[in-house]
Amino acid sequence: MRVLVTNDDGVHAPGLAALTRALARWAEERQEHEIMVVAPLANHSGASAAVGTVYEREAVSYRRVRIDGAEGVPTYGVDASPALAVLIAGLGGFGPRPDVVVSGINLGVNVGRSVLYSGTIGATLAGAQLGLLGLAVSLRAGFPPEQWSTASTIAVALLPTLCEAPPRTVLNLNVPSVPMEELRGLRRARISTSGIVKSATISVGGAGGAGGAGGAGEPSGATPADEGEVRMTLGTAVPTLGRLDESEDPEDDAALVAAGYAAITPIVGVQEDMAPGTDEIVRTALATVDRVLER
């Protein structure tokens, strides 16, 4: 089994190093797995599965990188987004085709609407388009020192099951930053509706102006000038919860992480919408355009 490690925080990020070291130990114990790292040279957080303007260049530059404690793992930093890094490696750019993509460990959870924007997850979805398995790993930020070992331990424990899964299976793992002995367990989660950007308002007076009149979630009512700023109200994707009673059973990914659980969610990338209602919309659209074309 060939495992490709990548991330969106960049090849020098501590989360990537922690994950690579854990995977290197796992591969050494079993002597039947190969680990390789191909990750962006720069931070690409929020890149989703973007590959950039690939038609404007014929090649992607790279350089060899050393990870302390995993010197035997071939590691390359590439001038590319996470998704493009996976496509390059997945198509044989750095040797034999990998079987599974492990992306992370991202500093900051990827839950709720962040699932759509995450470069960590986008890398695994790009791999799924090539038929590869994927595991995206993220750790809750804001609680230093970061408990990378907790996230890497859970990730490694999940790999044997993932490696037996059907092609294109992708799992999204989010872990609270707590010592392993304080982790409450691993739970299946649904994608919540939480998001980081709470509102957007015109900044009256432009840069350094008085700010929009509207409150969080409310439009300011200001008329946009020819240029200026739109101020964003930012929050956190993870709600603040007290200690849960044993009778409570949270299912949202954000709520589970806040409650001290690691949360796992199977996800899929872009695919055709086959819902009956959507099919009716398309048939109506086709008929409408046909009438226009007949004129």
Image (spheres, helix red, strand yellow):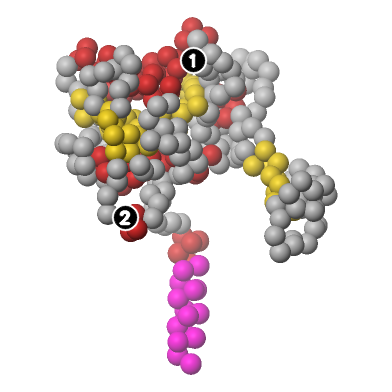
| Relative horizontal placement of residue 269, taking residue 221 as reference (left or right) | left
- What x and y, as percent, mark residue 241? 67, 22
- Check disc 1 and report its element: helix, strand or loop: loop
Which residue: 25% across, 40% down?
Answer: 89
- What x and y, as percent, mark residue 19? 37, 21
**How crowded is the residue under tag 2: few (<14 C-alpha within 10 Å), some, or many (20+)?**
few
Residue 287 falls within the magenta-colored stretch: yes
State the CA–CA distance, disc 1 to disc 2: 39 Å
Chain part drawn in magenta? 281-295
Which label belongs to residue 57?
Answer: 2
Q: In this view, does 6 lie above or below 125?
A: above
The foreground one among 177 and 67 is 67
Q: What residue type is labelled 2?
A: Arg
The foreground one among 242 and 233 is 233
Which residue: 38% across, 55% down?
Answer: 53
All told, the count of numbered labels is: 2
| Relative horizontal placement of residue 50, taking residue 107 as reference (left or right) | left
